[in-house]
Amino acid sequence: MSGRFKVGDRVLVKRDAPGGNPRTPRYARGKRGRVTAIHGVMDNPLDHRGRYPPLYTVAFDARDVFEGAGDGTLCVDIHEDWLEEAE
Amino acid sequence: MSDDHHASGSHMHDIEAHVRAVEEDLEYYRAKRLEPRIFFLARRGIVTLYDIIESGAEVKEPTVRPGGSLEERVRALEDALDEYVRSIGLVTFDLVKVDVVIEDTRKERGDYDDFFRIAKKHREGSLEERVGALERDIATYMRLLRAFTQAHFAKGLLDAGEVARRREQLAKPGVSHGPRIVARAWVDPDFKERLITRGRETVRELGIPPGRLGKLGVVENTDAVHNVVVCTLCSCYPHDLLGDTPWWYKHDSYKTRIIVDPRATLKEMFGLEIAREREIRVHDSTSDVRWMVIPRRPAGTQGMSEEQLAGLVTRDSLIGAGEPREP
């Protein structure tokens, strides 16, 4: 169950994850956020082909995501293969 | 937004809203649920277009266009739509010999790549003309669906007994356990805590089957934070617990706007004004974690029973697109 990240970690969403599942929304790609919840490996055979790596909720400041236009916080659930540590 | 567009018996006060809801749902189910499935199976030679044509010969003509007042015709359309949606549920159910997961369907229908999107039809003209167009379209959509279903039987892909059992199950309207869950959370802080941390397992305490559609994510509205839920890529929602989503939940006008400017979207689409000092958190659902909102308990509800409290909880308030009713 345990993954690379913990709650509070700053993460950067990759722009592209060729081997990863396609589910990461486009607006979050290449953006920085903060891990707010850890869901672990989700067993979801009805939906997924195979097992995906651990899942996290990542919170983004909407203004970062939409370059100043957004409002509030966006909480997006993203699998680990899409995430790396942010400086 | 209408919270109960399928409510029967009462008089329709906004026929246009009913017609729009039928148009949106009909195109959604055709372009997102049925036709991607047809393409998926056709590409793999499992059910070919020729199988469908052949089976189509056996399909009886659907019911003739109903007469009556505009309101009666719109009600007939709503019933026909319900039948269309239920029947799609039967053919998109697990096939006997074909390995298909929902992720495949999402690819096929263009959730991840606009290239694959199937165009939705827009109906113009007067209300009367739109209703006429819907009556014709729903009949032809239904013919394709029936032929497609028949082709499954002809190819031995669906088990007739299983389909009958499933039809019975689907005929029951989607029940929302949301109001009962929220009312309990309002009166019992320990339950609320367990619900937020453990999700689905907790609803067993109310005698509600926890379902199996991913993890249930629960967020609570407070004086500091307003939560609202969307699924930008498709339309994920804990519908096994909370019942069907309203049509706008699946519509791009909601999905694209709510993430960028939730404050304006809530105000313009739902008449819901969120005070400037409250932070808005938008939760983008996936099939892994499906989110629900615990709305704020309305003022002046002290002493109300749990059952009375449940009566205040609306479908929109479980998504964060509305507040519960005032007592």
Image (cartoon, helix red, strand yellow):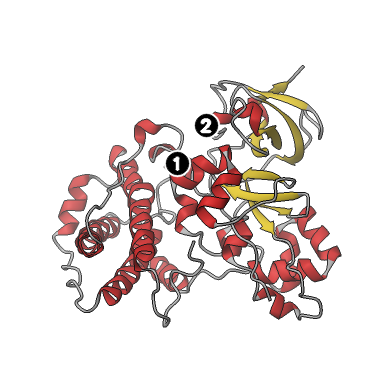
Q: Residue at x 44, y 54 (%)?
A: B94
Q: Which residue is mark 1?
A: B106
Q: Position of residue B277 (x, y in %)?
A: 75, 46
- Report the amino acid beneath label 2: Pro
Q: Residue at x 77, y 16 (%)?
A: A87
Q: Which residue is mark 2?
A: A22
What numbered label is drawn on residue B34?
A: none
1 and 2 marks in contact (CB < 8 Å): yes
- Image-based side of B65 in relation to B37, left or right: left
From this viewpoint, which residue is outermost toward the front?
B276
Chain bearing tag 2 is A
Q: Would you call the spot at circle 1 few (<14 residues within 10 Å), some (14-19), or many (20 or more)?
A: many
Tell me, yes or no, whether dots 1 and 2 are on the same chain.
no
Q: Position of residue B241 (x, y in %)?
A: 61, 63
- Image-based side of B152 in relation to B258, left or right: left
Q: Quadrant of residue B8?
A: bottom left
Label 1 and label 2: CA atoms lie apart by 10 Å
From this viewpoint, which residue is outermost toward the top?
A87
Secondary element at tag 1: helix
